[in-house]
Image (tube, rainbow, N blue to C red):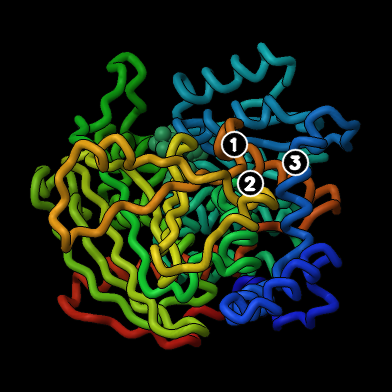
Amino acid sequence: MTEEKKKPEQSGSEKKGLGRRDFLQGLATVPVLGAFALALSRDLSYERKRKAQAFSHARKRTGDVKEVKIALLGAGAQGQVLMDACLKLPGVRFTAVCDIWTEYNQRRAARMLDKFGHRVNAYEDYRELLAEEKGLDGVLIATPDFWHAEQTVACLEAGLNVYCEKEMSNTLEGARKMVEAARRTGKLLQIGHQRRSNPRYLHCYEKLIRETGLLGRITSARGQWNRAVQEDLGWPQRYEIPESVLHKYGFNSMHQFRNWRWYRGLGGGPIVDLGSHQIDIFSWFLGANPAAVIANGGTDYYAKTTHEWHDTVMAVYEYETRDGIVRAAYQTLTTNSSEGYFENFLGDQGTLHISESAGRGGVYREPQAPQWDEWVRQGYLLAPEKAGQATRADAVLDVRETIAPDRHDIPVIFNDPYHMPHLENFFDAIRGEADLTCPAETGYETAVAVLKVNASIEAGRRLVFDPREFHI
Ligand SMILES: NC(=O)c1ccc[n+]([C@@H]2O[C@H](COP(=O)([O-])OP(=O)(O)OC[C@H]3O[C@@H](n4cnc5c(N)ncnc54)[C@H](O)[C@@H]3O)[C@@H](O)[C@H]2O)c1
C-alpha cells in the first residue's frame, strides 16, 4: 500500500498553521460555506515530507551535496534521457555504463559521459560490471522490461541502490521478487513513475485534492495516451548485433531487439508502456487501488507478427474510494494522436486536467460550487482565464447547452526535464535526506493494476481484484 493510502487522518492541530485554520474557521461562520469549510478541513492531512522534497528540489541545484557514484545499465532512448537529467544535477558521478549494443548505444553513452568529465568503464554484461566496479552507490536500470527483475535483484544483492524504470517488470512474479529483494537487502528501490516527484503533480495532489478538496466528490476519471502511427524502429546495418549476442540476451532478431515493447515475454504493449504512468496517477490521486477492471483491445492496425501486444486498448476501472465509487476510463491508441496524453479527475465541484506535458493542465469550477476566490488569493490556483469568452460572444448556444466553465491555471510551472526531480529524489534518499516517492511497494501496486488490463482482454470479461493481490 502506498504511504498516503495508509496514513490515518491527522487531527486539526497537526494539520496546518494558524493562517489556514483561521481561514477555515472564518468560512465556517458563514452558513452557506460551513459545509464547504468542513470538507476542506477534513482533507487537510497530507505528507509534509513529500511537500518539502517537491518544493525544495531547486535549492539543491546550487548547494553543496555529497557525491553519489552511479552506473547506467541500458543506454538506449530512456538511458539517454536519464543521463541528460543526471548531468544537470550536482553531486552525481557516473563511473560505469553497461549496454549489450556495444558498438552503438554503449559507445555513444560512454563518449558523451566522457565529454562531460565522467570517466566510465564500459561493459556488455551487467554481471561483469557488478564483479568489477567497486564503490558504486547506485544503478539506474533502463533496459527492456523483461530484464528489470533479474538485474534489479542482482544489483540489490550486490549492495547497490536501484532506480529501475517502469514497467517495474513485465510479470508480477518478477515484480514480487524485486520487492522481496529490496526488503531483504534493505537497499533502496525507486520505480521510474516520475510523475510521483513532479512538482506540478504534487501540487495538484497535495493542495487541490487532499488539502482543499477543491473538486468535491470525485466521481470519475479519464486518461489517455494517443499516439500517431509510427514506423517500426530500425537500426544502422553496419551496427547490427551478432545473432549469438542477441540470443544470449533473449532477443530473436534485430527487429525484436529494437521493437521489444510489442513482443510478448519482453514488454507489455502500449497499455503497459504508457498506461502504467497514468494508471499509477489514478491510484495515487484517488487514494485507492482498483476494485475491478474491464478492458477491450487488439492489434487492429499493425501486423500481428510484429505487434504481438495490442495497438488499441480501452479499459474501465472501478475504484472504491472513501467517498464512494469512482469509474475511470483509460485508453491507449497508436494510430491517432488526437489530444495527446493527460489525466482528468472529475468531481461534483470541479475538474482537474493534468498532463506531464508541461503546456497542458487546468482546473475548472462547476457552476454551483462555492467560489474559489480565496484559493486564488492564497496562490493555490491562478485567477480564472475567461477562456471561452470569444467563442461565447460569437456562438449562438442552445439554451440547454452548458457554458464552458472558466479555466484556472495550476500555479506550479515545471520546465526542467521530466525525470529530474524523480532522480533527485532517489539521490537524496541515498544521501539519507529524503524518502523515496515511488518505492518498490508502490510500483508493485501499479504493476498489479496495469497488468490486469491485458488479463481482462485475454479473458474477455470484467476482472475483480482481491485487495490482497496488491500486497506482498
Ligand atoms: N519513465 C519514462 O518516461 C520512460 C520512457 C521511456 C522508456 N522507459 C523505460 O525505459 C526502459 C528502456 O526503454 P528504451 O525506450 O530506452 O528502450 P531502448 O530499446 O531504446 O533501450 C534499451 C537499451 O538497453 C540495452 N539492453 C538490452 N538488453 C540489455 C541487457 N540485458 N543488459 C544491458 N543492456 C541491455 C539495449 O542495447 C538498449 O541500448 C524500459 O523499461 C521502458 O519502459 C521509461
Quadrant in the picture for the N terminus:
bottom right
Disc 3 to disc 2, how far (Cα)? 9 Å
- The residue lying at 76 percent from left, 80 percent from top is 10
Front tag of 1 and 3: 1
Write down the residue under mark 1.
414
Find numbered disc 3 in the image and state the secondary structure of the residue it sits on.
helix
Camera-side residue of 136 and 459 = 459
Amino acid at circle 3 = His
Query: Along the horizontal axis of the image, is 269 left or right of 138?
Result: left
Label 1 to label 3: alpha-carbon separation: 11 Å
Asked whether disc 3 touches disc 2, contact meaning CB atoms under 8 Å apart, the reply is yes
Q: For the residue carrying disc 1, how many other residues have a C-alpha within 10 Å: few (<14), some (14-19), or many (20+)?
A: some
Earlier residue among tags 1 and 3:
3
Q: Position of residue 148 (x, y in %)?
A: 51, 53
Q: Look at mark 3 in the image and give the residue it sits on.
A: 57
Residue drawn at (46%, 76%) of the image: 217
Instruction: Name above or below for residue 436 compared with residue 113.
Output: below
